[in-house]
Amino acid sequence: MDALPGLPTHEKLKQAFRLEAGTVQRYLYFARIADIEGFPDVAQTFRNLAESGICNAQGNLDFLKRVGDPDTDLPIGETDLNLTAAISATILEQTESYPLMAKVAREEGLLDIANWFETMTRTKKVHEQKLKKALAQLAAVRQEEPQ
Amino acid sequence: MSAASTPPASEEAEAPSPARPRTDRYDASSITVLSGLEAVRQNPGMYIGSTDLAGLHHLVYELVDNAIDESQAGYCRRITVTLLADGSCAVEDDGRGIPVDMHPLEGRPACEVVLTKLHAGGKFRRQSYQYTAGLHGVGLSCLNALSEWLVLEVWRDGFHYRQPYAAGRAVGELAKIGPSGRRGTRISFRPDPRIFGAELSFSAPTLVSRLRELSFLNPGLHIRLLDQGSGEEREFQYDSGIAGFLRHLNQDAKVLHPQPLALRLAQPGVDIEVVMQWTAGYGENILSYVNSINTVHGGTHLSGLKNALTRTVNRYASELGILKAENGERISTFDILEGLTAVLSVRMETPSFEGQTKTRVTNPELKTMVDEGVSGALLAALRADSRLAAQVVARALDASRARLAARRASERIRIQSVDTRVSKEVYQRQFGIRSQNWHQSAVWIANQALLAEHVRQLPSGHYPRMLDVCCGSGVVGASFKGRVGTMFGLDLTPEMIALARARLDCLTQGTVYQLPFRDNTFDLVVNREVLHLLPNPERPVAEIFRVLKPGGRFIVGQILPFGPEDAAWMYRVFKKKQPLIFNMFQEDDFRELLLGAGLVDLTMSEYRLWESIDVWIDTHETTNLHRHEIRELFYQAPQEVREVHPFEILPTGEIRDLWRWCVFSARKP
């Protein structure tokens, strides 16, 4: 497994993870529309497949876990590592990803979409704080544990 | 029973696991066995859905539904619900009375068994009731378990009986009070404040709407509601059935055809009734019931109805040659449901529901039955009445065309917004049509307290010239009457200007991007809930700054999210309601916007206002799909949003949202 980092397969695993994670969200979105349109059977099919998609996406994480978080390449696995990686990702999103997206949208004159990306930036700041709080609480629990 | 007692401490614990050393022993002594009623008290949500207002009212409905079952069986004609001043409630019927004789297996009076044992009741064997609504025996004992106290009274076989209970257990024997010629059951109870919280209480208006609905669904039944707190008394008795219900629902609506479509399909074990009427409104209002239970989340019967409507209207329109099916033309379900008011009532022997509170019916056969039954009957009805058919088809085609036009309009915005200018016609079209029932489209528009909050932000002084910019019907500007001199108004659409003429002195048609006024003209400029709709809001604010006299004041009201936690969710809700939204301001954004234009002395006050979203989303700018999606966004709101943003979903399915109005006031230096 140590050979994985940097290999094309590592990139493919990240890609597979994003594909499956995206599929889950699309299917859940489609299911809701099918429900509204009055096709509960179709909605159920979408939901069932989304459930499989969750399993599939996490299957990719099972492999990726050994080399790092797909978004930040930071080590993941145990909860404190996961929290640290998640915090880094929110920082990356609020300082780079979303501001850049907002800038592009603004330049193209798509001002509502730019504002949507800006809203995301703010959301990520809040998420960063919440994750940091969870990390601090975890550290406090660890302190109390007998060695 | 060692429900929540401390587990026994043990010194001789097994070798602790390396991951997480614990000293608690996990063995037979730590396995808790809950009796049925304790299980209900510990997990009430599993039985009544929730312990909020909806759950509280569910207790009353439980009793009323039991009485309705008794009436369906042919034994009960009158139901009385009494709300007492001490927060208790009593439900009385003139049915057969719950049996009081000894239960052969339990050795206790049958009524005590029904009130204290889960899954005991008269509805497990089909002989007693054909179509039932009550919770099949979980109900009464469950209600009893969640009541601080309960008193059962039965009039039966010539005697009056009485038995007291507390927290689900009998606290006295069933006593024969004396002889009596009447018949029936009366259950008085006080919901346990330890479960529902001391602050929750029954709401008469909520009960009124459900009791009215029940009396429509059960023609001939007499239902009375007495509210001892207010002294109010309401009686409901309708012989008109769901046709009368539909008339009640549409009493204020402009209907498209005077005679509703009424269909009835009876098969062995299933009885289906539908009434439908299209209105000039935009929302769809379809109420569906199974054995008088309001299936708020629909289910197979509603899917069947929607399918039938779509299929039949498309088929009929193609037959007439109005629709070119071979070219792929098709009227969508949304288009057909737009403006439709319908009541669908199913009575059946063995309904199956999702969840204990039965908000969705799942019998698969129901879908086919309703679909085929309604399709056949509807097609026949359309063929028989060509005038009605033409109206229904034209209404759906109209909706379909409007939807396509709206999509084209939003595509045009996209193209035009490249140079950040939105087509004037798009706004004119949107807000021109909106003017038709402007004041009915939301509570906030004419809410006096909210308007007063704007006026409160105005420092004392002399303001000879005021401008209400994007004035709409002029209510905001007019609320300053008496504090200002001449009241000017500006709006983009002639329709709004016509409305505003009744309130303001001097009106001009024009755009806020380029105010048709000289520099330093006004002592006060007011505006409410407009800047979020404008791309590049800095420009209109700069224009407002320009036309203000030095020392002049700008007062502006805006709905803001409660925090970054609900901003994205609110963005989605607002964007679905109003595609023209460009900014979901947060508080500091909005401050920056005003300060960035050069304004100073900025103050803000908050005013929170409950708004029923059903009214708010019933406008032509919100498509039918979006209306559904907005409701779903509330139903499925993330925990993070719920923690900061109050809203409530009433037992009727109505959603009430708390809006955070922020009124800013700033001065031009």
Image (tube, coloured by chain):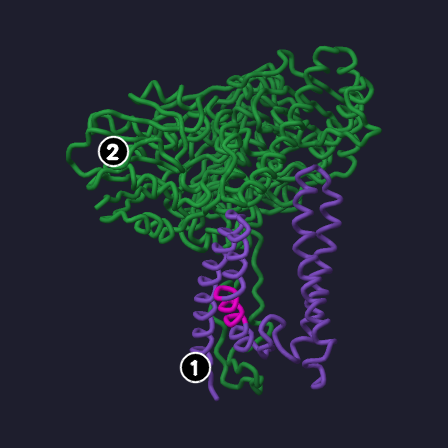
Task: State whether the magenta stretch is mostly helix, strand or loop.
Answer: helix
Q: Residues within 10 Å of mark 2 (few under 14, many from 20)?
A: many
Magenta stretch: residue A87 in it? yes
State left or right for residue B330 relative to residue A144.
right
The residue to which callout 2 is attached is B522
Q: Is residue B603 magenta?
A: no
Q: Residue at x 68, y 70 (%)?
A: A14
Residue B226, how many percent across, how many down? 42, 25
In the image, farthest residue toward the front: B518
For residue B386, above or below residue A84: above
- Check the image and report above or below for B317 versus B586: above
Name the residue furthest right.
B326
Question: What kind of residue is marked 2?
Answer: Phe
Left or right of B621 in this view: B321: right
Number of residues whose C-alpha sits closer than 10 Å to that of mark 1, classed few (under 14), some (14–19) or many (20 or more): few
- Which sits in the foreground, B623 or B220? B623
Name the colour assigned to chain A in the rendering.
Answer: purple
Give, as a three-letter code, the residue at label 1.
Glu
Secondary structure beneath label 2: strand
The residue that mark 1 highlights is A144
The chain identifier of the residue carrying mark 2 reads: B
Chain shown green: that is B
Tell me if residue A52 comes above or below residue B120 in the rendering.
Answer: below
Q: For numbered disc 1, what is the local secondary structure?
A: helix
Relative to B587, B461 lies left or right: left
Residue B423 image offset from top left, x and y in percent: 52, 35
The answer to whether residue B450 shows anywhere in this view is: yes
Residue range of the region highlighted in magenta in the rendering: A86-95
Which of the 4 quarters of the picture holds residue A137?
bottom left
Q: Nearer the viewer, mark 2 or mark 1?
A: 2
Q: Position of residue B156 (x, y in %)?
A: 56, 27
